[in-house]
Image: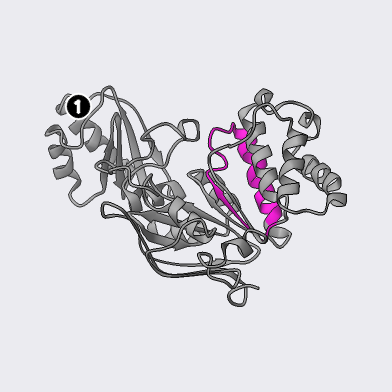
């Protein structure tokens, strides 16, 4: 049963430390609603995957409490496996088995009644547009088809709570749109979904709430619209002709010009918070030219979830095409801790 009226999970003062003193979660509080899609986002190492693994009963917290579907996940992980699904980012599929064989094998392992397995496999194949691919060996599947098959495995038991770690990573725009539409339909059918993602445009369109994480803490947790209203500003993004380090002395003049304005540097990309883009833009470009920093292109972004994310975390959200590359979305100085 839910932990409270309208909730499937409650987390209080959750902390997780790894050997060596790395703190992956540092006092997290979180309430997950039923019939909703909740996004977890933040740079690499911010604690998102650790939080998901604790909710799934795969990892015990160092301290604090987590109640999921009415029980402690660390103590009742076997019970929870019948009621929730955790779909990790790794696609652990046998390449020689067909899609149909894979689904049927997992259905047996999950204990589905044998008489219902065929109908359940067909139902999932239709809803995930896999029907024409079930007879193919998995090694012949495209990346998008593999992700759909992986998701189908997580849906075999019709879980009350679905936990997804970067399900849209590597998908093309059509594949991402299909997946987000599916997650929204699952929530409408009395399922709750928690998804780790950097697909912030889709989060604004499809998620009920979003948690922005950094350094094991939740910096903002509300509806995407509220997070934008409270934290987003107009942002100027400038593409330079060469990489620039955050410590480059030429940027000191720009920081002096900006005063308390927010400035971040990621290789060739400068991001600056703006109050009045019309009056400030000319001065910023002139200062860069005076310091022999060539601006190849620039763009002003209106307040949205991506600019709120930038202001909260100090880094730009990952581009969908770059997701999964080593170091993408990493804050300067991060040590690659679990999470």
Which image quarter: residue 93?
top right
The residue shown at (59%, 77%) is: 4
The residue shown at (53%, 65%) is: 73
Q: Which residues are magenta?
A: 159-186
Give the crowd class for mark 1: few <14, some 14-19, many >=20 residues within 10 Å: few
Is 48 above or below relative to 118? below
- Element type where label 1 sits in the image: helix
- Visible residue check, residue 304: no
Is 189 above or below relative to 197? below
| Pick the front one: 57 or 5 | 57
Q: Position of residue 237 (x, y in %)?
A: 34, 37
Give yes or no for residue 124 being in the magenta stretch.
no
Which image quarter: residue 69?
bottom right
In this rendering, would 198 be left or right of 174? left
Labels in figure, total: 1
Q: Position of residue 251 (x, y in %)?
A: 16, 36
The residue shown at (74%, 33%) is: 99
Is 172 above or below relative to 274? above
Residue furthest out toward the bottom:
5
Q: Which residue is mark 1?
A: 289
Is 230 above or below relative to 72? above
Give yes or no for residue 161 being in the magenta stretch.
yes
- Visible residue check, residue 316: yes
């Amino acid at each position: 049963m839910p932990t409270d009226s309208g909730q499937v999970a409650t987390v209080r003062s959750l902390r997780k430390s790894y050997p060596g003193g790395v703190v992956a979660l540092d006092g997290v509080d979180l309430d997950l609603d039923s019939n909703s899609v909740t996004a977890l986002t933040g740079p690499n190492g911010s604690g998102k995957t650790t939080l998901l693994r604790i909710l799934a009963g795969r990892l015990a917290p160092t301290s604090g409490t987590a109640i999921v579907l009415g029980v402690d996940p660390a103590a009742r992980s076997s019970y929870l496996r019948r009621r929730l699904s955790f779909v990790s980012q790794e696609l652990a599929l046998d390449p020689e088995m067909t899609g149909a064989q894979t689904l049927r094998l997992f259905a047996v392992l999950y204990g589905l009644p044998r008489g219902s397995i065929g109908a359940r496999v067909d139902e999932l194949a239709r809803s995930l547009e896999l029907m024409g691919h079930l007879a193919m060996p998995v090694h012949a599947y495209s990346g998008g088809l593999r992700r759909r098959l992986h998701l189908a495995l997580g849906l075999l038991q019709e879980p009350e709570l679905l936990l997804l770690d970067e399900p849209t990573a590597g998908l093309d725009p059509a594949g991402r749109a299909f997946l987000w539409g599916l997650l929204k339909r699952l929530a409408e059918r009395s399922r709750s979904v928690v998804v780790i993602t950097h697909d912030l445009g889709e989060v604004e369109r499809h998620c009920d709430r979003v948690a922005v994480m950094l350094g094991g803490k939740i910096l903002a947790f509300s509806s995407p619209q509220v997070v934008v209203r409270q934290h987003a500003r107009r942002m100027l993004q400038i593409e330079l002709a060469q990489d620039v380090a955050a410590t480059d002395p030429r940027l000191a003049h720009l920081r002096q010009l900006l005063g308390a304005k927010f400035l971040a540097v990621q290789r060739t990309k400068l991001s600056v918070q703006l109050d009045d883009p019309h009056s400030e833009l000319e001065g910023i470009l002139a200062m860069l030219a005076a310091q022999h920093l060539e601006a190849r292109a620039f763009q002003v972004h209106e307040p949205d979830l991506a600019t709120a994310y930038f202001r909260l975390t100090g880094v730009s959200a990952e581009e969908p095409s770059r997701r999964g590359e080593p170091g993408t979305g990493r804050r300067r100085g991060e040590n690659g801790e679990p999470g």
